[in-house]
Image (spheres, rainbow, N blue to C red):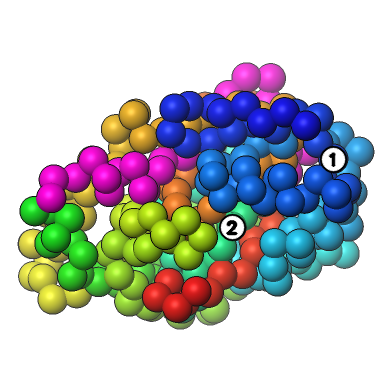
Amino acid sequence: MQIIPLTGGLGAEIQGADIRSTSSFQQIFEAFKDHSVIVIRNQTDITPDDHIAFAQRFGPINVNRFFKPVEGHPQIATVLKEPDQTEAVGEGWHTDHSYDDEPAMGSILRAIEVPPIGGDTLFVSMGMAYEALSTPMKRFLDGLSAWHSSRHVFGAEIAESEAATSGRLGNAQNATQDVLHPVVIRHPLSGRKGIYVNPVFTTRIEGLTQTESDALLQMLYAHCQQPEFHCRVRWNAGDITLWDNRATWHKAINDYHGYRRYMHRITVEGCPLQGC
């Protein structure tokens, strides 16, 4: 097994591994702890049951409320864009399940069919972003909390979106989650501090006026999008990427119109951000 960093600060590629092997799991888990984003190449013979068994080594599986499940495997969410579709689910910078009381630990995405070019995924290190802030700004943020919600992303107001009308997203009646999380969290595995707000699910900062909250969030979002904090995953069919939702943002790059991109995603349950 070879573990090759993707950048100076975030992500690694693993070659020569097999996710079905229990003997290699500890090395993969240590790489996940160290790098937050792991790309395991050439898992071409993996079945949905193999995918599920691998995910369960990290923890219990979160059955997604809103994504279309894979037939016969409700633990696996379908991530799909057909050649005639223009919207890709996950185009905005976000952290999976930040709207839950106990946000997801990680997500494990398996590439089944990818376009000949494009369709990459970008990630941001929230630990690097926090550490690059000034000391006064760190002190200010450390005392704040922010609201996160699923309502505006998966609820009734997106009923006419392409993702909903095509059946890729559904169950809008279940989009009832609103939760307050610290703006800065200490990672339960590394102890590293990181920013925990994101442009898709965070709605406002508690205790600030709407104008103040909007201004502060926009500043943080612009700060986090600096390329020095990023890594980029270029997919091949058979690749599996897992990322730590408590340490990263990610977004899908929608630059492959006219081609199909088909993936399976499993989300692993987390724990309270202040009590892991």
Of residues 136 and 124, the one nearer the viewer is: 136
Q: Quadrant of the N terminus?
A: top right
Q: Are marks 1 and 2 in contact (CB under 8 Å)?
A: no
Quadrant of the image occupied by residue 115:
top right
Give the residue at mark 2.
106
Q: Of the numbered discs in the image, which one, if any, rests on residue 113?
A: none
Residues packed near mark 2 inside 10 Å, few (<14), some (14 to 19) or many (20 plus):
many
Q: Would you say 201 lies left or right of 103 here?
A: left
Q: Which residues are magenta?
A: 110-135
Q: Residue at x 64, y 48 (%)?
A: 30
Looking at the image, which is closer to me, 264 or 188? 188
Q: Determine the image quadrant of residue 194.
A: bottom left
Residue located at (77% from left, 50% from top)? 25
Count of numbered tags = 2
Circle nearer the viewer, 1 or 2: 1
Three-letter amino acid code at disc 1? Asp
Q: Secondary structure at mark 1?
A: loop
Front-most of 229 and 96? 229
Mark 1 Cα shell of 10 Å, populated few (<14), some (14-19), many (≥20): many
Q: Earlier in the sequence, mark 1 or mark 2?
A: 1
Residue 187 figure quarter: bottom left
Residue 38 vertical placement versus 215 (above, below): above
Q: Position of residue 110 (x, y in %)?
A: 73, 44
Residue ID for mark 1: 18
Q: Residue reaching furthest top? A: 117
The question of residue 134 being in magenta is answered with: yes
